[in-house]
Image (cartoon, helix red, strand yellow):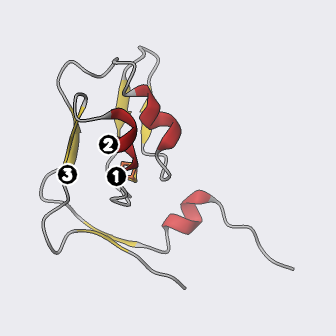
Amino acid sequence: MSEIMNLKAKLGLDVFKPYAEPHITIKAGMEKHHLLKRAVLVCPAGLYSENAGGEVELSIDGCLECGTCLVACGSEVLEWHYPQGGSGVQFRFG
Ligand code: SF4
């Protein structure tokens, strides 16, 4: 009988080395922008959320560096670059 893993368990297989500074930031004043709300729906790691005030928040720990949020939302609302070498995600496949 196979066991179904939830998102947190799957992400727990990867290793995340701390970032010196966040490699993705929401641009100032764009927290309520309609384009940014797409990130809540598309981030495979579930790192974006919308608070009670309608602002989108990002918790960068666990980022897979996939770039989906940048493609979905655009550089108008997000500042996005890869983390410095030696930091960020290290994938584990089993
Ligand atoms: S790069 Fe991928 S995992 Fe990281 S915040 Fe964007 S959508 Fe989520």
> Circle 3 sits in a helix, a strand or a loop, which is it?
loop
Q: Badge 1, how many Cα within 10 Å: few under 14, some, many 20+?
A: some
Image quarter of residue 31: top left
> Circle 2 sits in a helix, a strand or a loop, which is it?
helix
Q: Badge 3, how many Cα within 10 Å: few under 14, some, many 20+?
A: some
Q: Position of residue 86 (x, y in %)?
A: 17, 75
Q: Is residue 78 above or below residue 94?
A: above
Separation of marks 2 and 3 at Cα, in angstroms: 12 Å
Q: Give the numbered dot on residue 67.
A: 1
Label 3 sits on what residue type? His
Label 2 sits on what residue type? Leu
- Is the CB atom of the residue marked by disc 1 within 8 angstroms of ligand 1's nearest atom? yes
**What residue lies at 41% left-to-right and 14% top-to-bottom?**
53
Position of residue 94 in the picture relative to residue 82 (left or right): right
Residue receiving disc 2: 70
Q: Is residue 7 above or below residue 89?
A: above
Whether tag 1 and tag 2 are in contact, CB under 8 A, the answer is yes
The N terminus lies in which quarter of the figure? bottom right
Q: Position of residue 37 (x, y in %)?
A: 43, 27
Counting labels gives 3
- Is the CB atom of the residue marked by disc 2 within 8 angstroms of ligand 1's nearest atom? yes
- The residue nearer to you, when weighing 87 against 80, is 80
Residue receiving disc 3: 23
